Image: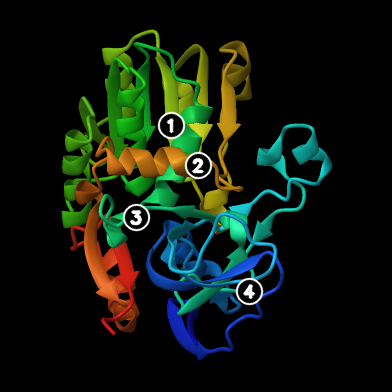
């Protein structure tokens, strides 16, 4: 089978690998499609070693081993990339989100491949009559958006700021509105590129009440002019440097939820610890592994509470992987979520 690997600087390599062995309790899934995640882009920018790419995979169950329950050959499924072990101390103490022995396929298998072998309880059924194949690829990133938004602990009528109009941030805007936010401010970096302008435009369609960009606005001053006491909740899906601004715009007792990645010097941030302390703020990290909230995510997509047609902008075949990655990273392209799917057989 073929599998896609990548490393810096933006090098892609298709490898011909044997189909992984099917151990008890495992299933073989024939991958039909998968989305490109920002993490894949980070791998291509920073990883010096070849790394399996793709972890937003959707497919069809091809084989099932002994000990498999609730899954049958032919089932259409969305695949978790990380799952709790349910055996370690944290899991047994009711904290599976902090599992000490996570199961993942990402260490040695690529979601952009012909097949994946996973634990049978790492898949979620979906009905292709209710949710199109390429739209099903949005379920995994939606679980990430749910994780960071729920970590923020929104309350009814809260003033909310979302930093970052990528797929996660745009979904967070809609989730915040569904949770009863009074207003949602969406902050992007610019409108001068096709990508930047388009993402902010979609942010408005997702429910953002106020759209700002660092290129055009003094973000902190503008938000504090609108909400002088500071906003209730901040959701950061942007680089870590925005945490400093999140602290400044937060009210006394506010909560900041953070899900943003940067490597190198960009991973380091400096902020006024006294301001953080005296405002009694909370900074809550969201790293959505293991993958929770899949049933909720699938239902939100099926019901169009989160409209996948607003977010899915490009679909390519696996043979067009290089073009797909170039499209997603090109500021002149109106790209939000890019999906790769198998060629017609």
Q: Please rate how many residues cluster around mark 4, counting C-alpha atoms within 10 Å: few if below 14, some from 14 to 19, many from 20.
A: few
* Residue 46 at x, y percent in the picture: 53, 68
Q: Please rate how many residues cluster around mark 1, counting C-alpha atoms within 10 Å: few if below 14, some from 14 to 19, many from 20.
A: many
SS state under label 4: loop
Circle nearer the viewer, 1 or 4: 4
Circle nearer the viewer, 2 or 3: 3
Q: Earlier in the sequence, mark 2 or mark 3?
A: 3
Q: Earlier in the sequence, mark 4 or mark 2?
A: 4
Residue to which mark 3 is pinned: 136
Query: How far, Cα to Cα, is label 1 from label 4?
Result: 32 Å
Q: Earlier in the sequence, mark 4 or mark 3?
A: 4
* Residue 3 at x, y percent in the picture: 49, 81
SS state under label 2: loop
Please tell me the numbered disc located at residue 235.
1
Q: Residue furthest right?
A: 89
Q: Is residue 36 visible?
A: yes
* Residue 308 at x, y percent in the picture: 25, 48
Q: Earlier in the sequence, mark 3 or mark 1?
A: 3
Residue to which mark 2 is pinned: 259
Asked if marks 3 and 1 touch (Cβ < 8 Å), the reply is no
Q: Earlier in the sequence, mark 1 or mark 4?
A: 4
Q: Nearer the viewer, residue 182 or 116?
A: 116
Residue to which mark 4 is pinned: 108
Asked where in the image residue 103 lies, by quadrant, the reply is bottom right
């Amino acid at each position: 089978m073929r599998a896609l690997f990548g490393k810096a600087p933006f090098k892609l390599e298709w490898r011909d690998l044997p189909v992984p062995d099917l151990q008890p309790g495992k299933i073989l899934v024939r991958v039909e499609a998968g989305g490109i995640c920002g993490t894949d882009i980070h791998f291509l920018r920073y990883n010096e070693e070849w790394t399996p790419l793709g972890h937003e995979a959707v497919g069809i169950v091809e084989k099932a081993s002994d000990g498999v329950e609730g899954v049958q050959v032919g089932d259409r499924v969305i695949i978790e990339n990380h799952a709790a072990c349910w055996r370690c101390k944290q899991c047994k103490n009711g904290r599976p989100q902090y599992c000490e022995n996570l199961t993942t396929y990402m260490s040695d298998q690529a979601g952009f491949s012909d097949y994946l072998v996973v634990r049978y309880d790492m898949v979620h059924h979906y009905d292709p009559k209710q949710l199109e194949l390429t739209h099903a690829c949005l379920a995994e990133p939606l679980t990430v958006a749910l994780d960071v938004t729920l970590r923020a602990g929104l309350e009814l009528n809260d003033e909310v700021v979302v930093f970052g109009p990528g797929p996660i941030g745009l979904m967070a805007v809609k989730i915040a509105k569904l949770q009863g936010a009074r207003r949602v401010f969406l902050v992007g970096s610019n409108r001068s590129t096709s990508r930047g302008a388009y993402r902010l435009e979609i942010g408005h369609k997702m429910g953002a009440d106020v759209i700002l960009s660092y290129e055009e606005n003094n973000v902190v001053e503008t938000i504090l002019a609108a909400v002088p006491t500071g906003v209730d909740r901040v959701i950061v899906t942007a680089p870590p440097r925005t945490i400093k601004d999140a602290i400044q715009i937060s009210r006394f007792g506010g909560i900041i939820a953070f899900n943003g990645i940067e490597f190198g010097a960009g991973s380091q941030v400096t902020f006024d610890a006294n301001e953080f302390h005296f405002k009694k703020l909370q900074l809550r990290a969201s790293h959505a592994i293991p993958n929770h909230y899949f049933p909720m995510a699938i239902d939100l997509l099926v019901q169009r509470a989160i409209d996948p047609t607003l977010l899915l902008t490009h679909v390519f075949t696996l043979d067009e992987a290089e073009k797909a990655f170039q499209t997603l990273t090109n500021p002149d392209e109106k790209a939000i979520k890019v999906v790769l799917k198998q060629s017609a057989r």
